[in-house]
Image (tube, rainbow, N blue to C red):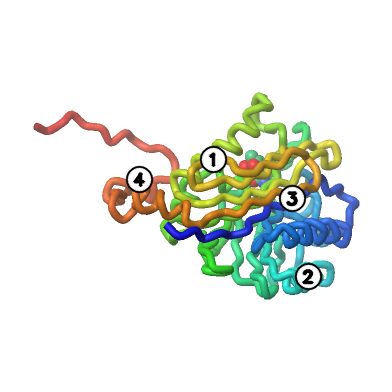
Amino acid sequence: MNKRPFGLAVAQLGPIQPQDTRAQAVKRLLELMKEAASRGARLVVFPEMALTTFFPRYWMTEQEAIERYFEPTMPGPDTQILFETARQLNIGFYLGYAELTQEGRRFNTCIMVDQQGNIVGRYRKIHLPGHSDHKPAAPFQHLEKKFFEIGNEGFHVWETMQAKIGMCLCNDRRWTETWRVLALQGAEIVALGYNTPSFNIHWDEPGHLRMFHHLLSLQAAAYQNAVWVAAAAKAGNEDGNHLIGGSAIVAPSGEIVAQAQSVDDELIYCLADLALGDAFKQHIFNFAAHRRPEHYQLIVERVGPGAPLGKPPQS
Ligand code: CDV
């Protein structure tokens, strides 16, 4: 099988504090982008909400959040330089940010920008975690359901940069449906950014499970869908709230080929052979040959569990 090498970089960001400006965040993104380009990357993946602190942890009005944390245009005055530098360096990028639409709608969004600096794709987060009500007794809050609408554009794959690239965001990675919908469009790479708090506000989850479930989700999804996964964290201590790191590049074999060691700004890179996914797609996960959608109806008919379907055998 002919190799199809693709320079793939993931740019983990250390903490962004509430008082940090967009310009400060963009400066850090530019440094990481330059490092990615110098290592030969065709694409660099930045985290979810890469321009600001992870603000859904704070209770505030929607209007306050809009004024402080949302982007009404992309590119905007502070982010234009990212697009220009990408074009100069001939590198594409994935960027997560809080999107305010012209109609005033709010989404947790990421975009794919090609090597010419054009926005070629947009994804609005579908699996929003957390809650919308005020929980003042909680150590911190997770108000994505208050500040964002559920994404209204579905899961998509784009043919760009000589590859088929899908996008999702953070909590989406825990849901098998995300990956299969992308894989059924022939995804070769799935890019995702995340902000995963090291603590769970809902129950006393043992700390080690946060990293374990993160990597388990990426590795299982990469293997079962024969895709490369490029996952970028925002990590470390944001205003006293710790976020896991663990940014990783995972091969279609399910093996981790690069992983961040710090909870700070850190670039990881690998020369991903896209043909490696083809071997899995043609054999064990040859969907066209082996999938049995006539037996999967419940996946789209039911949201939560319902009555068991089991009956005694008729003959
Ligand atoms: N930003 C996220 O979507 N975070 C979730 C947390 C809340 C579990 C995640 O899946 O990592």
Density class for disc 2 (Cα within 10 Å; few <14, some 14-19, many ≥20) is: some
User: What element does badge 2 sit on?
Assistant: helix
**Residue under pointer 4:** 284
Relative image position of residue 72 (x, y in whole percent): 75, 69
Disc 1/disc 2 C-alpha distance (Å): 32 Å
Residue type, numbered disc 1: Glu
Say if residue 74 shows up in the picture: no
Relative image position of residue 164 (x, y in whole percent): 51, 63
Nearest to N terminus: mark 3 or mark 2: 2
Density class for disc 3 (Cα within 10 Å; few <14, some 14-19, many ≥20) is: many
Nearest to N terminus: mark 1 or mark 3: 1
Residue drawn at x 39%, y 46% as measured from the top left = 302
**Residue under pointer 2:** 85
Q: Is residue 55 left or right of residue 119?
A: right
The number of numbered discs placed on residues in the rendered structure image is 4
Q: Is residue 264 left or right of residue 148?
A: right
Q: Is residue 280 left or right of residue 204?
A: left
**Residue under pointer 3:** 267
User: What element does badge 3 sit on?
Assistant: strand
**Residue under pointer 1:** 255
Disc 1/disc 4 C-alpha distance (Å): 16 Å
Residue type, numbered disc 2: Thr
Q: Are marks 3 and 4 in contact (CB under 8 Å)?
A: no
Disc 3/disc 4 C-alpha distance (Å): 33 Å
Q: Are marks 2 and 4 in contact (CB under 8 Å)?
A: no
Task: Using the rendered view, name the quadrant where residue 261 is placed.
Answer: top right
Disc 2/disc 4 C-alpha distance (Å): 41 Å
Q: Nearer the viewer, residue 247 or 312?
A: 247
Q: Are marks 1 and 2 in contact (CB under 8 Å)?
A: no
